[in-house]
Amino acid sequence: MANQMKVRKIPERRCVGCGEHFPKSALTRVVRSPEGEISLDTTGKAQGRGAYLCKRADCLQKARKTKRLEAALSSKIEEDVFLRLEAALAREEQ
């Protein structure tokens, strides 16, 4: 018994678009910095309030339509920010 390896728990997060749970590493983090700037956090360690999205463009559209991303980040999100997020997700998807 003393030689058994400890099973590590894999952290899970919920996508604000589709609402499904995934391992944290499979999702993309969107962060609102303390200054109020909204961007993709590729490292997962940026300071600020974060929300997680699947790496699919349709989840971003769903979160946008239902305003779940705005609610999760506690901030109004402008149109140009959504366009930048779509472009960044498209680059990350490839």
Image (cartoon, grey):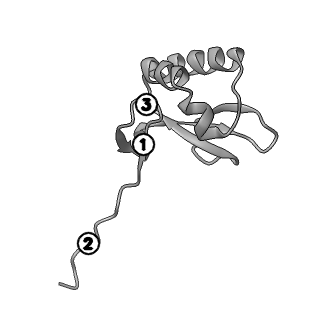
The extreme right residue here reads 35
Which residue type does callout 1 highlight? Arg
Choose between 49 and 88: the one closer to the eye: 49
Q: Position of residue 70 (x, y in %)?
A: 62, 32
The residue where tag 2 is placed is 5
Residue 94 visible, this angle: no
Q: Quadrant of residue 33?
A: top right
Residue depicted at 57% across the width and 32% down the height: 69
Query: Dot 3: few (<14), some (14–19), or many (≥20) neighbours within 10 Å?
Result: many
Residues packed near mark 2 inside 10 Å, few (<14), some (14 to 19) or many (20 plus)? few
> Foreground mark, 3 or 1?
1
How far is the residue under mark 3 from the one under mark 1? 9 Å
Residue 88: % across, % down: 58, 21
Q: Secondary structure at mark 3?
A: loop
Secondary structure type for disc 1: strand
C-alpha gap between disc 1 and disc 2:
28 Å
Amino acid carrying mark 3 in the image: Cys
Residue holding disc 1? 14
Q: Which mark is residue 45?
A: none
Q: Residue at image x 21%, y 76%?
A: 4
Q: In the image, residue 3 lies at what x, y percent?
A: 22, 80
**Badge 2 amino acid:** Met
Q: Residue furthest bottom?
A: 2
Q: Residues within 10 Å of mark 1 (few under 14, many from 20)?
A: some
Residues under labels 3 and 2: Cα distance? 31 Å
Specify whether 80 is left or right of 90. Answer: right
Pair 1/2: label in front = 1
Give the residue pinned by disc 3. Answer: 54
3 or 1: tag closer to the N-terminus: 1
